[in-house]
Amino acid sequence: MHHHMTLRSKLIIMLSVMASLFLVALDQTIIATALGKIVEEFNAFSSLSWIVTAYLLTTTITVPIAGKLSDLFGRRMILLIGVAIFGIASLLSGTSGTVTELIAWRAIQGIGGGIITANAFTIIGDLFEARERGKWQGLFGAVFGLSSIVGPLLGGWLTDAHNLFGLTTDWRWTFFINVPIAIAAFALIAIFCPALRHDKKPIIDYKGAVLLTIALGTLILAVDNTEMIFKDLLEATGMSLMALRVIMFSIVAVATATFVWVERRAREPILPPAFFRNRNYVLIMGIATLFGAAFLGSILYLTQFNQQVFGATPTESGLMLLPMIGGLMLTSITSGQIISRTGRYKIFMQCGIVLATSMVALLATLTPESSYLYEAIIMGFLGAGLGVVMPVMNLAVQNEFKQHELGAATSSSQLFRSLGSTVGVAVFGAMLTAGLTNGLTGVQDSAYIKTLEQNPATSKVGDLGDSNTLLNLNMPDTKSAITSGFEEGVAKLPESTKDQVSNDFKTNQDAFGSKVTHAFSDSLQHIFVVSSILMLIATVLVFMLKEKPLKASDPDKTPGVA
């Protein structure tokens, strides 16, 4: 298979695949800077993690199924379907009228994203020998890196309302922008990508797919903001939150056990149990899961930190991530090159993960009083550490298996990584809400909130007893709207009292702002502490890996290499 194709045609295929991968990677970060504005428009802070989670959840479930389908029906057809779903769902996400609609379209978009991700990394395995793969994994890592720079910048720029082709942009454009790229990627793949299929009759493990979906879906619902999601159900049935969680975790346990049972009997399992007899495979899946949680958690919540604590606009919060992405790009490309030359990967993983872990731990020291320079230095080194680990994980997995298992092997490492991200974002989201509720106790009685309650201009802000609304009050737009509303109200007072009233209002507003900012910052500190503990466990697992040198010849023809 490797040898029938010229380098030029391989390059064209890689470019078309990179274009579609760029779309998916862009989407994960572009949304980070737009989230603030989206939840502000829909007044839905409690749904913040869901806008991300819905996408991640369907991606997670789709990846192993898509990997399997492409092993059976050929990569090209499956990739085209993925790009089409992604493009259409992006268009529809941008037209959402409610937060529920947005979450639904994001879920469908995730299906497209999962199909693209699963195939992109597998195609490297199809086209190149194990030793050559390093360079390409590094380049794909760089595509992720590049999209993580472009994402927050573009997301912030579009969200901050600019003129584009005579139209005014807003957060919806962060979705619309995907459509032209999707069309281009679709055309390139349709023209240049060969079918790349294996000649076996398709057998698909539907039972496994359904059980996996139930287990993952219920798990996410159980760890995310459960009380908000099932509020009506809990009130209607009078069930306690504890009881609901127990039921949900039992469903997860039963579905997982049944899944394992089904997979052991399936002819073509989605997640072959035989993989788990391979010690390195198990370790790498553990690393991927922990790493996924810590990685996405840090990008998503750093952006929130910059917007809430440093008061950055969406554009600025995107720019503020640059040091991290610079570090990521740099090491991702260079480590891939060196690994291809040396055939050794473990030492890189060790250095990268130790560096990344120590930096996540330092993120926990950020406070509203920290300087941006301090944050920037931490982020630069964090990016450098992550940039080494990301591409190497796929390499290490592919090195353990034969050609015909690559689809399942590679997609399962993506599966565990996005499982980590999904559960991580859900848990962190719940921690944030809990931390804020705790940190803002008694704020309802503060002078500022009392003033707002008497002020007719605040009726459209929402329920002042809700931590969502309190966060929203601190967002720059809402803040200026309230202030101008208040100024109008005071305008009728005589000069002498007007200044006094305005000053009091300003003082109270600042006191409130500071309280919210500190509550937010404290919650984020807890998130970063948990993140660094997860990374620490991942570090231990990396040191336990047994390195096999990267194979230089075709693994199928080498006797005795499993």
Image (cartoon, rainbow, N blue to C red):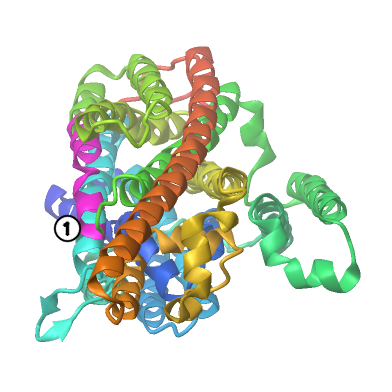
Looking at the picture, how far across and down is residue 111, in whole percent?
A: 49, 66
Residue 315 is inside the magenta segment? yes
> Relative to residue 3, is residue 111 depicted above or below?
below
Q: Nearer the viewer, residue 353 or 97?
A: 97
Q: Quadrant of residue 238?
A: bottom right
Q: Nearer the viewer, residue 135 or 471?
A: 471
Q: Amino acid at mark 1?
A: Ile
Looking at the picture, how far across and down is residue 160, in whole percent?
A: 22, 68
Judge the density around disc 1: few (<14), some (14-19), many (≥20) Cα neighbours within 10 Å.
some
Instruction: Determine whether the residue tagged by mark 1 lies in a helix, strand or loop.
Output: helix
Q: Is residue 461 left or right of residue 132?
A: right
Looking at the picture, how far across and down is residue 439, in whole percent?
A: 56, 43
> Looking at the image, which residue is at 40% across and 39% down?
298
> Looking at the image, which residue is at 35% across and 14% down?
347
Q: Is residue 146 left or right of residue 111?
A: left
Whether residue 28 can be seen here: no
> Looking at the image, which residue is at 56% across and 25% down?
283
Residue assigned mark 1 = 12
> Looking at the image, which residue is at 77% across and 50% down?
252
Q: Is residue 10 left or right of residue 61?
A: left
Looking at the picture, how far across and down is residue 359, in whole percent?
A: 36, 24
Residue 100 is inside the magenta segment? no
The number of callouts visible is: 1
> Relative to residue 221, is residue 310 depicted above or below?
above
Q: Which residues are magenta?
A: 314-331
Whether residue 534 can be seen here: yes
Q: Nearer the viewer, residue 78 or 330?
A: 330
Secondary structure mostly seen in the magenta stretch: helix
> Relative to residue 71, is residue 396 depicted above or below?
above
